[in-house]
Amino acid sequence: MAKREIGGWILPIPVDRLLKRLHDAGYEAYLVGGCVRDCILGRAVNDYDVATVALPEQVKACFAKEKVLETGIRHGTVTVVLEGMALEVTTYRIDGDYADGRRPDSVTFTSHLIQDLSRRDFTINAMAYHPREGLVDPFGGWADLQAKTIRCVGVPQTRFEEDALRILRALRFASQLSFALDVDTADAVHSLCGRLPCIARERVQTELVKLLVGKEAGQVLLGYSDVICTAIPQLKPSIGFAHDNPHHRYDVWTHTCQTVALCGEDPVVRLAALLHDVGKPFCFSRDENGMGHFYGHAAQSVEIASDIMKTLRFDSKTIHEVETLIRWHDVPIVPTEKSVRRWLARIGVQQLRRLLDLKKADLLATGTRRHEDPQVQQLDTIASLAEQNATTCLTLRQLHVDGNDLIRLGFLPGRLLGDTLQRLLQEVMDGDCVNKKEALCMRAQELLIEKEETI
Ligand code: ATP
Ligand code: MG
């Protein structure tokens, strides 16, 4: 069995204690999967997963005094909470047949680590490590990590037929790690991606988001558009759809991929970037000079994006935030304090930051604009105005008068009261009134008198 020390790997104390406790009880146990891969790469480790020969009940007995959650006991997984750290411990297992191409019909426990490693998806995810035993690497994961290669454990065709989600996982690892797919793995990805629709939408969503926020998302989307379009068929019309406009060098899909690549790694922005022009092919028109236009494409894209996100089971907050960004992505923002404050009041500082990020990426991804261009520079000016004004009075809650104050001044509960509060907020944001109770009450009284005079 190939073993190799991973130099300088210092484990968190609870992880070390967990491995030791199992070993002291006579059970073999190793760190496995993502944490081994990320440690070798020097990346931050997400979570430490442990595989062991011990059965779930035996693991529980080893940690009788600790909190143990039966997170996936049917598949052999329990979560041990040790000194505040949650650690998943899974019994070595072999997956049974995958009749439905998405989950094994049964799992069987085994006492052999190598069998457990052989059910894992890619060689770089099929290594195990123990501080005293070193690295166990039966499928050449270490070499593939050095070569930056994603390669299936076993025959790619079979592995993707078993579980088509692995197709998307291959792409997300390529995007996250800046790796390339091995030729056979890539061939199988292309030839079997038609199986993706049978995968649970929640699982697709998880991998898609990880792909999107990866460093190489733009490249991976472009290189594997067939796969992405199987997961999200509504993107298909964008592929090869020409802008026929001198402001755009690329077709809609290439522009989309470039936009994804050029904006920050915030999942909401990346998702908005992926979907911001999905409605373009349905809004195309040509003017008398033969130039292409896409009037109304933002609203059309919001509608399609909304359907896509619902199908993929995104939560309503994400859906709302992405819709907002898409809705406004094409609307100009005036670079003045007054206008920026209004935008802050309308969508809030976090969303405005995201919107500016998206707008900048969208401009640069036309392939005809550069960072030095005035339009791009203007977005930077707006971004600094947004930061300078981020803490000024922006919501009704932050206004130093409320409905009760206005009722004391003679307002009746109802529409006029609400409108007056909005008006006061607007005046504070525009710098026409200070956010102090006395000043606001005086102004409210003026407005009330004005109103009464007009009746
Ligand atoms: P991350 O750091 O993003 O969590 P990860 O590699 O830990 O990456 P997980 O989804 O947490 O990914 O899976 C943990 C491990 O389980 C993987 O490293 C791999 O060994 C195995 N695995 C996960 N999903 C599959 C799958 N669909 N088919 C085969 N093995 C899988
Ligand atoms: Mg993980």
Image: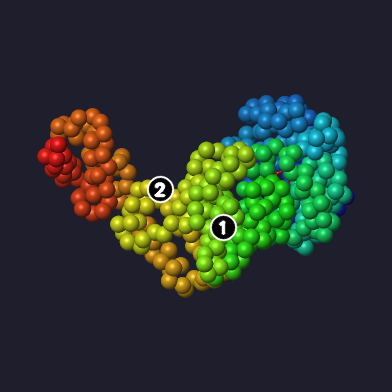
Quote the CA–CA distance across marks 2 and 1. Answer: 29 Å
Earlier residue among tags 2 and 1: 1
Task: Kindly identify the amino acid type of the residue bearing the numbered disc 2.
Answer: Ile
Q: Residue at x 53, y 58 (%)?
A: 294
Residue 79 image point, x, y percent: 67, 33
Q: Are marks 2 and 1 in contact (CB under 8 Å)?
A: no
Residue behind mark 1: 284
Residue behind mark 2: 347
The residue closer to the viewer here, 176 or 37, is: 176
Callout 2 secondary element? helix
- Vertical side of 131 occupied by 378: above or below: below
Residue 13 image point, x, y percent: 63, 44
Residue 277 placement: quadrant:
bottom right
- Vertical side of 112 occupied by 1: above or below: below
The residue closer to the viewer here, 390 or 50, is: 390
Which image quadrant: the C terminus? top left
Residue 280 image point, x, y percent: 57, 55
Q: Residue at x 55, y 43 (%)?
A: 306
Characterize the local packing of mark 1: few (<14), some (14-19) or many (20 or more) Cα atoms within 10 angstroms.
Answer: some
Callout 1 secondary element? loop
Q: Is residue 24 left or right of residue 301?
A: right
- Vertical side of 147 occupied by 159: above or below: above
Task: Kindly identify the amino acid type of the residue bearing the numbered disc 1.
Answer: Phe
Q: Residue at x 39, y 65 (%)?
A: 381
Q: Is residue 348 left or right of residue 302?
A: left
